[in-house]
Amino acid sequence: MWAVIGTWRMSLEGIENNYKCLKEGEDSGEIVENIIKDVEDFPFFKSVGYGGLPNEDMEVEMDAGFMDGNNFNIGAIAGIRDFSNPISIARKLSDEKVNCFLVGDGAERYAHKAGFERKNMLTDRAIIHYKNRVKEDRIKQEESELKPYIGHDTVGVVCLDTNNKISVGTSTSGLFMKKKGRVGDSPVIGSGFYADSEIGGASATGLGEDLMKGCISYEIVRLMSEGLTPQQACDKAVSDLEKKLIKLRGKAGDLSVVAINNKGEYGVSTNIEGFSFVYASENHAPKVYLTKREDDKSIHYEASQEWLDEYMKTRTAELKLL
Ligand code: SD4
C-alpha cells in the first residue's frame, strides 16, 4: 500500500507530479521532498518558498522540517533566507545525528557549504503585498492582529511508501509581517510534523503559537498508537486543544491537521472554514477535498470545479499597489 496527503489545495500539483513514482516503489522521503519542492518553486503560493510573504522587515524568512519515520531522523531549519528549497536543506540535515535543527545565519552557512542553490525569494508580487499591507495598517491606525494568511499556509506532506516507510515534511514562510526571528510550529518536531512508520504520521498548519501548545502532530500519532483511526485522532487532537485553549485563554487560533496511518488511511480535522487538502493512494487518484467540522466531527467533500477554478484565478490575479 502507498498513500500521500498534503495540506491545502496548493499541494495538488506536487502530488500529481510525484505520486506515480510511489507505485514504482520510490522512497517516501524522496517523494515528500519532491512534492514540497514543487510547492516552494511556484511563485503564486504566498506562504511557502519563492513568492512567500515577508516579515515586517520585508525579508522572506522560511522554516522547514523533515522526519523519517523508520529511524526517527529529523532535520529542521528556521528563519533561513535566500535559499530556494528549504525542505531539501531540512531533509539533508536529517542525516546528521547532532546539529540537525539550525536557525538563521547558522542554517544559511550550512546550506551554503552544502551547495544548496541561493535565490532571492522576495518576488515583486510579494513586495506589492507588503507595501499594501503597510498602507492598510497605516489607514487603520492600529496594529492588526497576526493571522495565518487565509487559504494558504504551510505545506505539510505525509507519505507512506510501498516499503511501509512513513515520512513527513513541512515548509513555510510563516506568518506575513511576523517579527524577524519569529518561528512557528512548522520546523518544530512534534508540533508541525511527526512520523513513526509503525503507527502513522501527521502534520499541522495554522497559528503556530497555538499549534505548539498542543504538540499536536505528536499527539495525533500517539492517539493513533492507542487504536484511534487517523480521523478520530485528528478530530480529538483538534477539538481537545481548541477546548483547552478557549478554557485557559479565551480563544484558539487556526488549527488544521492531516494524518495517515500505516495502512494508508487518512484523517483531517480543522477548526476553520475552508480548509482544503489533497489525498492520493493506491485506490484513489489525487483529489482536492474541503473539510468542515460539525459537532466535533469532520466532513470531507470534494472541491467543485468552480471552487478549483476560482482558487487559481484569485492566486494569479493581477495585483496593484494601493
Ligand atoms: C506558522 N503554522 O508559522 C505556520 C504558518 C501557517 O501561515 O501554517 N500558515 O505558524
Image: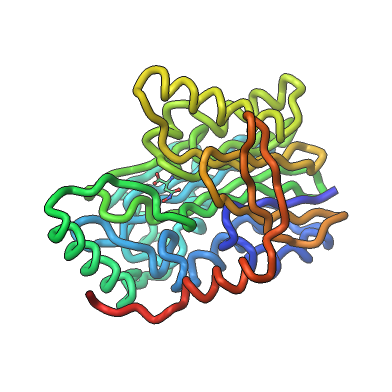
* Residue 95 visible in the displayed image: no
Task: Identify which residue is drawn at 78% across, 59% down.
Answer: 22
Answer with the quarter of the image where residue 182 lies: top left
Task: Identify which residue is drawn at 78% across, 37% down.
Answer: 262
Please provide percent x and percent y for residue 40: 49, 65
37 above or below 202?
below
Task: Identify which residue is drawn at 72% across, 19% down.
Answer: 226
Viewport quadrant of the C terminus: bottom left
Task: Identify which residue is drawn at 26% across, 71% down.
Answer: 127
Answer with the quarter of the image where residue 116 lies: bottom left
Colour scheme in use: rainbow
Instruction: State left or right for residue 302 relative to residue 173.
Output: right
Please provide percent x and percent y for residue 101: 41, 42
Please provide percent x and percent y for residue 59: 25, 62
288 above or below 207?
below
* Residue 38 visible in the displayed image: yes
Instruction: State left or right for residue 132 relative to residue 167.
Output: left
How many marks the image carries: the answer is 0
Camera-side residue of 314 and 56: 314
